[in-house]
Amino acid sequence: WFLSILTAVLSTFLLSFAAGIIYNIFPAYAFNLGIPAYEIGLMILLVGLFRLLAFLEAYRLKSRIGETKIFLAGSLLMALASTIMAPSRTTLFFSISLSIFGFSIGLLYAASIAIFLKKGRGGEGQAAGLFECLLGIGYFLGPLLGGLAAEFSSEAPYVLILILTVSISIFHIFHRSTKV
């Protein structure tokens, strides 16, 4: 029980931390690189579209690869996305990265809320409240720490996502054999 909830907590924090940076810091970063605002808007739209795709496919993926591997797949995809994002300078590479971010955020979101609702003690309302609280913490800390990191380098927020993602992926790798 504890490991299941911890997996969902870490994944929820990761997805909201990364989304907080993408939605709040990325537009200014891309604009400073000379990318037109309409292209930035379309790239952010890709995050939402691929997130929707992940929501639609999450159940099928869960039945195919198993519940525990969804968390690992989501965090590894996010690591790939942040690895592409940090050195990128063009709309094409940002679009690829943000599409992967959107899909990974969708996988982690769907898997995490399912764990909270299934394994949470105290009813669905309490489980959903905990989930939303964790989302809020990540959405707050992502831009805060990402903005602080951006003071040192404009790529640093995405490196920060990578470090957090790799750390959580290592957790998922060591605990993937545990039934969630």
Image (cartoon, rainbow, N blue to C red):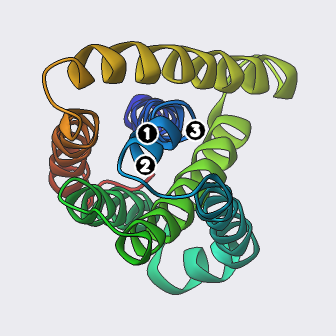
Q: Amino acid at mark 2?
A: Ala
Q: Of label 3 and label 1, which has the lower sequence position?
A: 1
Quadrant in the picture for residue 40:
bottom right
Disc on res. 23? 3
Where is residue 163 drawn, in percent x and y? 16, 39
Labels 2 & 3 near each other (Cβ < 8 A): no
The residue beneath circle 2 is 30
Which label lies toward us, 1 or 2?
2
Which label lies toward us, 3 or 1?
3
In the picture provided, is 60 more to the left or to the right than 23?
right
Q: Is residue 107 above or below residue 161?
A: below
Q: Identify the residue at image location x=66%, y=28%.
A: 120
Q: Identify the residue at image location x=67%, y=42%.
A: 113
Q: Of label 1 and label 2, which has the lower sequence position?
A: 1
SS class, disc 3: helix
Where is residue 111 drawn, in percent x and y? 59, 54
Q: Is residue 11 above or below residue 71?
A: above
In the picture provided, is 56 more to the left or to the right than 61?
right
Q: Amino acid at mark 1?
A: Ala
The residue beneath circle 1 is 18
Q: Is residue 85 above or below residue 64?
A: above
Q: Is residue 78 above or below residue 147?
A: below
Distance from label 2 to label 3 (Cα)? Answer: 12 Å
Disc on res. 115? none
Q: Of label 2 and label 3, which has the lower sequence position?
A: 3
Badge 3, how many Cα within 10 Å: few under 14, some, many 20+?
some
Q: Identify the residue at image location x=76%, y=74%.
A: 56
SS class, disc 2: helix
